[in-house]
């Protein structure tokens, strides 16, 4: 963070004003944790992609360190390796924290029904090719799949 504009007095004033106006982490808010304090101010459009160095508040975002790191790792700031993987972690009910996770349905029409973590009320249809097999030895005695004398 020692590079321009982050080491300038203008940025320090803008950062302080933005955190005073928007103290809560945007990333955590989107994941259902609305009251996590932010300590990082990030450009919505990176300077490397032509964004202004000192934008207005609408061009900045407040993040906690974890959300800022996750956002930066998935963005153009990361360099040649970019990721569109969803963020890790689950809510107490087991659903993913990331609202953009494919589990939530996304844009795929086949996934528009609500997901549930409980078992389906119906059992899956039986497989008609499944058969129970009984094996008989030469004496005609039945024994399991392990064969006679198993467990001795």
Image: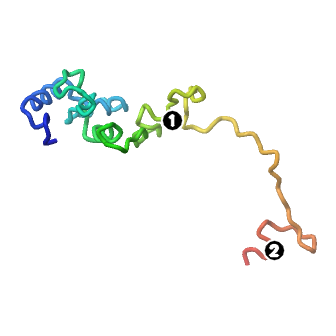
Please rate how many residues cluster around mark 1, counting C-alpha atoms within 10 Å: few if below 14, some from 14 to 19, many from 20: some
Image colouring: rainbow
Q: Quadrant of the C terminus?
A: bottom right
CB contact under 8 Å: marks 2 and 1: no
Which residue is rendered at x = 20% and y = 28% of the image? 23
- The one nearer the camera, 7 or 131, is 7
Rendering coords of residue 36 (x, y %): 26, 34
Please rate how many residues cluster around mark 2, counting C-alpha atoms within 10 Å: few if below 14, some from 14 to 19, many from 20: some
- The one nearer the camera, 96 or 47, is 47
Rendering coords of residue 14 (x, y %): 13, 27
Residue at the outermost left position: 9
Q: CA distance from mark 2 to mark 1?
A: 48 Å
Q: Is residue 113 above or below residue 120?
A: above
Report which residue position mark 2 lands on.
Answer: 148
Q: Regarding mark 1 in the picture, which secondary structure is present there?
A: helix
Report which residue position mark 1 lands on.
Answer: 103
Q: Regarding mark 2 in the picture, which secondary structure is present there?
A: loop
Q: Is residue 38 above or below residue 145?
A: above
Q: How many marks?
A: 2
In the image: residue 15, left or right of residue 136: left
Which residue is rendered at x = 80% and y = 50% of the image? 130
Rendering coords of residue 42 (x, y %): 23, 32
Which residue is rendered at x = 57% and y = 37% of the image? 118
Q: Quadrant of the N terminus?
A: top left
Q: Quadrant of residue 46?
A: top left
The numbered mark, 2 or 1, whose residue comes first in the sequence reads 1
Rendering coords of residue 6 (x, y %): 14, 36
- The one nearer the camera, 50 or 45, is 50
Q: Quadrant of residue 20?
A: top left
In the image: residue 91, left or right of residue 136: left
């Amino acid at each position: 963070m020692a590079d321009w504009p982050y080491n300038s007095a203008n940025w320090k004033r803008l950062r302080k004003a933005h955190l005073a106006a928007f103290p809560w982490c945007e990333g955590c808010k989107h994941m259902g944790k609305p009251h996590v304090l932010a300590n990082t101010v990030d450009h919505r459009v990176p300077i490397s992609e032509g964004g202004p160095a000192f934008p207005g508040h609408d061009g900045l975002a407040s993040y906690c360190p974890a959300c800022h790191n996750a956002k930066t790792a998935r963005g153009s700031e990361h360099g040649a390796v970019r990721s569109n993987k969803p963020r890790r972690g689950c809510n107490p009910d087991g659903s993913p924290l990331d609202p953009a996770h494919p589990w939530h349905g996304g844009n795929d029409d086949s996934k528009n029904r609500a997901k549930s973590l409980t078992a389906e009320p119906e059992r899956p249809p039986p497989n008609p090719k499944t058969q129970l097999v009984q094996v008989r030895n030469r004496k005609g005695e039945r024994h399991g799949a392990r064969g006679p004398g198993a467990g001795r």
